[in-house]
Image (tube, rainbow, N blue to C red):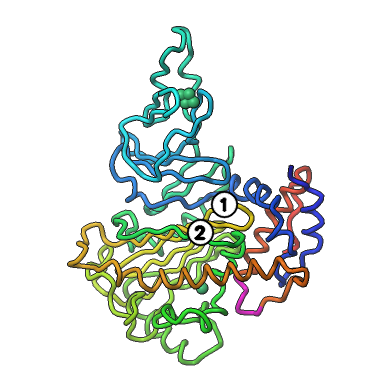
Amino acid sequence: MIDLDHIRRLLAERRDGFSLPQGFYVDPAMHEADIKAVFEADWLFACNVCEIKQPGDFLTLEVGPNPVVILRDRDGEVRAFHNTCRHRGSRICGKEKGRATRLVCPYHQWVYELDGRLINARQMPPDFDRDGYGLKPVHVEVICGMVYICLAETPPDISRFRAAVTPYIKPHMPDRTKVAFEMTLIEDANWKLVIENNRECYHCAGNHPELLVTLVEFVLPDDEQGRKFQDLLARKTSRWDQLGLPHRPAEGGQEFRCIRLPFHEGMLSFTMDGGPACNKLLGDFTEPDLGSVRMFRVPNNWNHFLSDHIIHFRILPLSHDRTALRTTWLVHEDAVEGVDYDVERLTQVWIATNAEDAELAAVNHRGIRSMAYEPGPYAPSEFMIRNFLGWYAAKMESFANPHAPMQVAAE
Ligand code: FES
Ligand code: FE
């Protein structure tokens, strides 16, 4: 049972510019509230269309207690359904990925078409109305090959996000890729700590030796921290302007961030020597020196789009103190393993970085459980966490005050 008074009290305690009151991170009941207020309400990144290329290809995921199946139907459309049988509720597809001509429930073998219609329900009486028992649909939006789903009855508007990020990511053609490697890491931390960790690079210098071979720690074009960065940026962006590749930060507010930033001079890709990770470039690119488009969208997705590969990151909360991070590395659909790319070289930097971040989030969570914890101040460079928490607090405000929909967080 969710205690809305408890959430209201925690929100009243929250101070802008400080980490959240303890209960938001460590209270087991907060998991259910987060699922309802955030994960059952907003658009979530699910996968790339290349993972469900052929009719009948499916991929499953669990949003809190909700099993979902995403598939390619016979007409080539991407669809999503609640992966729960209309007979007595069994989960239907059990595998994370697969191909099926129809979806057959393992319990009593009710059979569903790829468009969700119930087409066979054996032993049911002749007058049984199959049309009334199709799979319940889940909203789907495909943005340049990235599949987003929304479980809400009426999803929030995603058109501003689509319009803003498309010019940045379309040239990388995420829809013309294949998965070179994927992995799921279970982090022992509340999902908000996983996002917070991702939203700042204050921790990079002390923790990410592999990443910092190539990644420049600065995060905005007007970053005042170094003349060297300004010179690098000016050189790179004048070339990107000639190529027609947008790079200035998009107006994403608290909802999303999209920007193209350079790597260190001479560095081309996320590898241990900064050299290419895949010799076959994405899309129509002929130049490898494109830095990376960094795109983040609340609540569960961040990405890097490089000249030679793309990395999608997806998080889903498993409980108040466990979070699943799924990472997919994508290369050009025609790239050949062992010829154009080597999986170990392609994945080495971010496998190491993910492991380092998972450890940081886990020890962050452990420390927050302490009786001595109190919310601490963010540094100016942690402004993206303030954006995220402002967005989160507004979500929780309207969830905890359902009869006052106009009331939002202070910022
Ligand atoms: Fe699915 Fe019975 S629960 S067929
Ligand atoms: Fe990190």
Q: What kind of element bears circle 2? A: strand
In depth, the one of 267 and 20 nearer the eye is 20
Image position, residue 298 (x, y; %): 56, 58
Label number found at residue 68: none
**Which residue sits at x=29%, y=57%?**
177
Q: Which residues are magenta?
A: 379-384
**Label total for image:** 2
Residue 134 shows in this picture: no
| Residue 384 percent coordinates (x, y) | 60, 70
Question: Does residue 285 sit above or below 204 in this rendering?
Answer: above
Point out residue 137 in the picture as x, y percentages from the top left corner.
49, 34
Residue 145 in magenta stretch: no
Identity of the residue drawn at 57% across and 52% down: 318
Q: In the displayed structure, does residue 106 sit left or right of residue 7?
A: left
- Of 255 and 16, the residue lying toward us: 16
Residue at the (34%, 75%) spot, across then down: 269
Q: Disc 1, disc 2: CB below 8 Å? A: yes
Q: Mark 1 falls on what kind of element?
A: strand
Picture quarter containing residue 59? top left
Q: Amino acid at mark 1?
A: Leu
Q: Amino acid at mark 2?
A: Ile
Q: Quadrant of the C terminus?
A: bottom right
Q: How far across and down, in percent of the image, does residue 100 sit?
A: 32, 35
Report the residue marked by disc 1: 318
Height in image: 405 above or below 356?
Answer: above
The residue beneath circle 2 is: 186
Q: Quadrant of the N terminus?
A: top right
Between discs 1 and 2, the one toward the N terminus: 2
